[in-house]
Amino acid sequence: MPHFSIEYSANLDARVDMGELCALVLRTVLDTGLFETGAVRVRAFRAEAYAVADRLPENAFLDMSFRIGTGRSAEEKKRTGEAVFAAVSEHLAALFETPHFALSLEIREIDPVLSWKKNAIHPRLRGK
C-alpha cells in the first residue's frame, strides 16, 4: 500500500507538469521491484497558501512523502528513496538554476495494526 504524495507551492504550476511528474515517480517506484503495480498510488496536492524562507514570491517548494507498508529492509528503503530523489531532481533540474527552490522527500512506514485496506485492483492485476 505505498502512497506517494507530492505537496507543492502553487507558483510551480506554470513550471512543472504535475501529471508528468506523478508518472515519473510511479515508474521509478515500480522499477525498484519492491512494490506491486496495483498497490502504488501517486498524487500531487497544490498548496494555495504558503510562505517560503524570506517570502520572496519566486520561492517555491516541492515536498514528497512516501508511506509504505512494513517488510522492507533499511537498505531497500534507502535505495528506493535515492532512486526517486535522483529522478525527480533530474526532472526538476531547471528549478535549481535559481536560488529559490527547495525539494524534500521522506519515507515512513505505516503501522500495520492501525491501517485498514480494501483493494479491488489487486485481483485484476494479479490475474494477468
Image: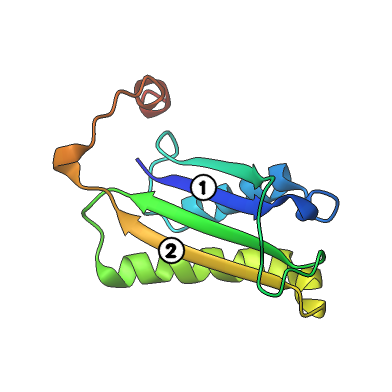
| Image position, residue 62 (x, y; %) | 63, 60
- Label 2–label 1 contact, CB within 8 A: no
Name the residue that disc number 1 marks.
Answer: 5
Specify which label sits upstream in the sequence, 2 or 1.
1
Q: Nearer the viewer, residue 46 or 112?
A: 46
* Residue 8 falls left or right of residue 96: left
Amino acid found under the numbered disc labelled 1: Ser
| Image position, residue 56 (x, y; %) | 79, 70
Determine crowd level at label 1: few under 14, some 14-19, many 20+ residues with C-alpha closer than 10 A. Answer: some
**Quadrant, the N terminus:** top left
- Compared with 38, 6 (above or below) is below
Q: How is the image coloured?
A: rainbow
Residue 14, numbered circle? none
Image quarter of residue 112: top left
Image quarter of residue 39: top left
Q: Residue at x 48, y 50 (%)?
A: 30
**Quadrant, the C terminus:** top left
Q: Residue at x 33, y 50 (%)?
A: 68
Q: Residue at x 61, y 43 (%)?
A: 45
Image quarter of residue 71: bottom left
* Residue 119 falls left or right of residue 9: left
The residues tagged by marks 2 and 1 sit, at their Cα atoms, a distance apart of 10 Å
Q: Residue at x 53, y 63 (%)?
A: 84
Amino acid found under the numbered disc labelled 2: Glu
Determine crowd level at label 2: few under 14, some 14-19, many 20+ residues with C-alpha closer than 10 A. Answer: few
Q: Nearer the viewer, residue 33 or 63?
A: 63
| Image position, residue 114 (x, y; %) | 18, 39
- Compared with 105, 43 (above or below) is above
Name the residue that disc number 2 marks.
Answer: 106
* Residue 75 falls left or right of residue 88: left
Assign a secondary structure to mark 1: strand
